[in-house]
Image (tube, grey):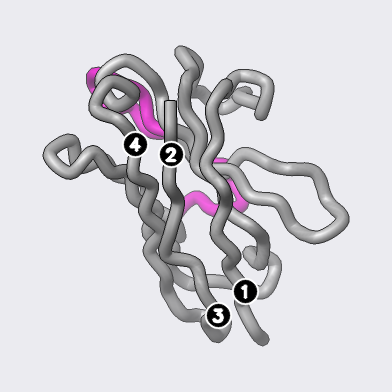
Amino acid sequence: VQLQASGGGLVQAGGSLRLSCAVSEFALEYFAIGWFRQAPGKDREWVSCITAGDGTIYYAESVEGRFTISRDNAKNTVYLQMNSLKPEDTAVYYCATDSLTCNYDVTINDFGSWGQGTQVTVSS
């Protein structure tokens, strides 16, 4: 399954960005889609995910209330709207799929296909 993440950039603290992840129609229908991020020198961490079918959504505590994941099936795209950005949100953001798992305990091992990543930099 191929994914293409985009929308990263440089923004000041308090600002907003919207990331996009283009996925296949097959993936949207059958697999969960997840967003992860990796800051310099740190492990890749889970940010949010949305299930196939009913679109149940989960967020990491660090982004709850600031980030919103959504899915546009007509465009085969999953979005991550990021508001009230903080310098600690600076990371390369990845979308991932090929997973039947989406809950608060997901890890990178639950996802089999990854996009190339998009850099998000939040200045203070």
Please name whichever residue, 65 or 26, is drawn nearer the observer in this view of the structure. 26
Q: State the CA–CA distance, disc 4 to disc 1.
A: 24 Å
Tell me where residue 124 appears, x and y as whole percent.
Answer: 67, 86
Mark sitting earlier along the chain (2/3): 2
Magenta residues (range): 50-65
Among the 4 quarters of the image, the one containing residue 119: bottom right
Please indicate, yes or no, whether residue 57 appears anywhere in the rendered image.
yes
User: Image point 43% across, 25% down: which residue?
Assistant: 1
In front: label 2 or label 3: 2
Q: Is residue 79 left or right of residue 116?
A: left
Evaluate if marks 2 and 4 touch, with contact meaning CB atoms under 8 Å apart.
Answer: yes
Q: Residue at x 44, y 63 (%)?
A: 82
The residue to which callout 2 is attached is 3
The numbered disc on residue 10 is 3
Sequence-first disc among 2 and 4: 2
Residue 11 x, y percent position in the rendering? 52, 81
Q: Give the residue type at disc 3.
A: Leu
* Residue ID for mark 1: 121
Q: Are marks 3 and 1 in contact (CB under 8 Å)?
A: yes
**Residue at label 4?**
23
Measure how far apart labels 4 and 3 are at the Cα level.
24 Å
In the image, what residue occupies the spot 57% across and 21% down?
A: 112
Eyeballing the image, is 30 above or below 21?
above
Q: Position of residue 36 (x, y in %)?
A: 59, 43
